[in-house]
Amino acid sequence: MTIPMASGNNNISVLCKDSSGAFFSTHVNTAVSGGCVFGQGPGDLVGCLPEFNSTVSSPVHFVARDQDPGNVTHGMRVINSSTQGVLYQGCGRNLDAWIHIAPGTYNFTVESLYTCTEPPPGSAEGVQIGPVTVN
């Protein structure tokens, strides 16, 4: 399960009720740096790096995950949203890639793929990452 959280310190509280009707709870403090952006679509695509509105150096580190409850995602790719050029494409539900990118300000799309190379029928699930300034 993925829980969206703001950057900074967060307190997570869990309240449970057992079969006898008794309640119990616990609290956990977490520190979150950055934040992940959740995709729009049927899967569970999350883009975590680069962070929204950040300034980074090339190569740029991209991190995204797709938990894919339907087990149909078999690849992921990174697209320059302005040119629609594919910057990276690979197999698997986890994207962790360093990509050389020329200096400038960009918006990127990370998409889940049906196979290692093809989007699913219809449209791919995607998450927008940006703007990102590359030094």
Image: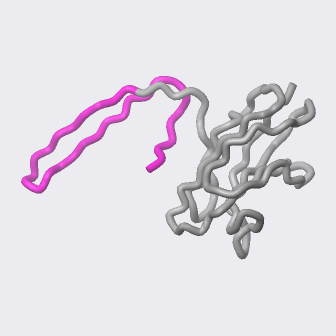
Q: How many numbered circles does the render carry? A: 0
Is residue 21 or residue 119 the one in the foreground? 119
Q: Residue furthest bottom?
A: 121
Is residue 15 or residue 94 the one in the foreground? 94
The magenta stretch spans residue 3:
yes
Residue 49 location in percent, x, y? 68, 37
Residue at 78 percent across and 50 percent down: it is: 78
Q: Residue furthest left?
A: 20
Is residue 29 or residue 57 the one in the foreground? 57
Residue at 91 percent across and 32 percent down: it is: 104
Report whether 3 appears left or right of 134: left
Residue 107, picture quadrant: top right
Report whether 69 appears left or right of 82: left
Q: How is the image coloured?
A: one colour
Residue 20 location in percent, x, y? 7, 54
Residue 73, picture quadrant: bottom right
Q: Vertically, is 54 above or below 70?
A: above
| Magenta residue span | 1-29
Report whether 23 appears left or right of 119: left
Residue 128 location in percent, x, y? 73, 48
Residue 14 location in percent, x, y? 29, 40
In the picture, the quarter occupied by the C terminus is top right
Residue at 69 percent across and 51 percent down: it is: 127
The magenta stretch spans residue 80:
no
Report whether 27 appears left or right of 71: left
